[in-house]
Amino acid sequence: MKIGLFGGTFDPIHIGHMVAARVALEALGLNRVIFIPTGFPPHKMGVSVTPAEKRLQMVVLAAGYDPVFSVSDWELTQQGPSYTVDTLTHYRSEYPADELYFIMGADMLHDFPNWRQPDKILQLARLVGMARPGFDLDKCQALLQKEIPGSEERVYFVDMPGLEISSTWLRERIRNRQAVDFLIPDRVIHFIEENRLYDGE
């Protein structure tokens, strides 16, 4: 079985995330995609993040109704920073016979050589960079080949539609009482409104 692992803060989850998961699933022939809300992302230490339980509920509302999508709270139950190598070690033990694909924004791959234990990450799973229009694929591939020789065999790039949507921008729209219809799944919008999330940012 081919399993996609899609980690993210998802604060909030939005249509861009859902499209990325669907495009990756279809392009790589994945059997399923597991959404993994991050606990304490190392690159966001010191940044205000919506409580884990609320973010988890939003992801369940967005992805939990599609049979090829599922949601895991594993990272949220761990103490300390959420490092990708630890997450993948866990899922490799959960799915020892399956092919794992870790899905991320292609721009994040520029910094991948600086992640904790990048070589081990590549042993545990294949990486999938979701590339938006204008992404410099050649530059990124050259960087990875220079810093981590042989990585090109374990890294895939998938073209994404040009959806310029970010969680930061959406939080700002919500704070300013601007509409987010069609940008965030309806169930998630209702949850945000009921819980008054992002009102006081």
Image: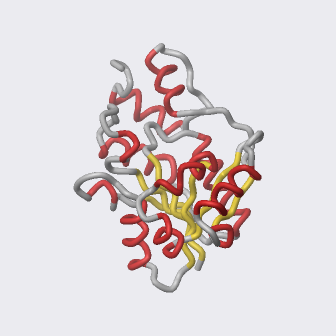
Position in image of residue 97 (x %, y %): 51, 86
User: Which of 181 and 89 lies nearest the eye of the viewer?
Assistant: 89
Q: Left or right: where does residue 27 sit relative to residue 104? A: right
Q: Is residue 162 left or right of residue 169?
A: right
122 or 79, which is in the foreground? 122
Quarter of the figure with the C terminus: top left
Residue in the picture at 62% in, 45% down: 107
In the image shown, does 114 or 47 lie closer to the viewer?
Answer: 114
What is the quadrant of residue 145 in the picture?
bottom right
Percent position (x, y) of residue 195?
33, 30
Q: Is residue 3 above or below residue 196?
A: below
Q: How many marks?
A: 0
Can residue 67 be seen? Answer: no
Which color scheme did the rendering employ for the protein? secondary structure
Residue 117's place in the image compared with 96, above or below, is above
Question: In x, y percent, where is residue 75?
Answer: 33, 58
Q: Give me the residue at 42% from left, 43% from top.
A: 58
Q: Residue furthest top?
A: 176
Residue 7 appearing in the image: yes
Residue 27 placement: quadrant: bottom right
Question: Compared with residue 97, is residue 187 higher up or lower down, i.e. above or below?
Answer: above
Which residue is outermost to the bottom?
Answer: 97
Farthest-out residue, left: 79
Q: Position of residue 148 (x, y in %)?
A: 58, 65
| Residue at the spot 48% in from the left edge and 64% down from the top edge | 118
Task: Give the quarter of the figure containing the N terminus.
Answer: bottom right
Q: Identify the residue at horizontal 43%, vertical 44% (top origin).
A: 9
